[in-house]
């Protein structure tokens, strides 16, 4: 489970929802988030690679991972 810190304080995202949440946030996000999302999608070997890369990048900022 990802727990928000700093700007994301009060938010939690369960592992099974992490990819979809990241996709939604990038879709509605700023230009940098949208561009990064598209670049990862364009260069991914397959959907699994894309999902892993996106989740790793998206939750590397104001998020902490905690085992569920």
Image (cartoon, helix red, strand yellow):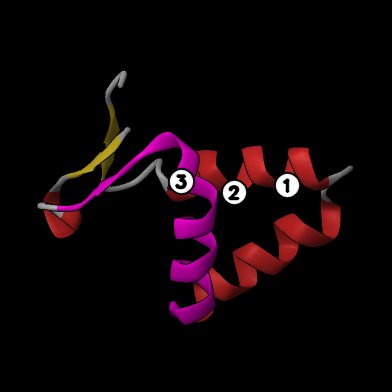
Looking at the image, residue 68 lies above or below residue 63: above
The residue positioned farthest toward the right in the image shown: 45
Around disc 1, counting alpha carbons within 10 Å, would you say few (fewer than 14), some (14 to 19), or many (20 or more)?
some
* Rendered image: mark on residue 50: 1
The magenta span reads 11-30
Magenta stretch, main secondary structure class: helix
Which residue is located at x 43 percent, y 68 percent?
A: 25
**Tag nearer the camera, 3 or 2:** 3
Give the Cα separation between the discs numbered 1 and 3: 13 Å
Which residue corresponds to mark 3?
Answer: 18
Which residue corresponds to mark 2?
Answer: 54
Give the Cα separation between the discs numbered 2 and 1: 6 Å
* 4 lies left or right of 55: left
Based on the picture, tell me whether residue 27 belongs to the magenta stretch.
yes
Q: Secondary structure at mark 2?
A: helix
Based on the picture, tell me whether residue 7 belongs to the magenta stretch.
no
Q: Secondary structure at mark 1?
A: helix
Residue 34 place in picture, x, y as percent: 57, 74
Around disc 3, counting alpha carbons within 10 Å, would you say few (fewer than 14), some (14 to 19), or many (20 or more)?
many
* 58 lies left or right of 53: left
Evaluate if marks 2 and 1 touch, with contact meaning CB atoms under 8 Å apart.
Answer: yes
Q: Secondary structure at mark 3?
A: helix
């Amino acid at each position: 489970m990802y727990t928000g810190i700093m700007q994301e304080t009060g938010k939690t995202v369960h592992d099974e929802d992490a990819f979809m949440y990241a996709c939604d946030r990038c879709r509605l996000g700023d230009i940098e988030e949208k561009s990064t999302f598209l670049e990862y999608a364009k260069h991914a070997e397959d959907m699994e690679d894309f999902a892993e890369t996106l989740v790793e990048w998206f939750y590397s900022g104001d998020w902490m991972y905690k085992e569920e």
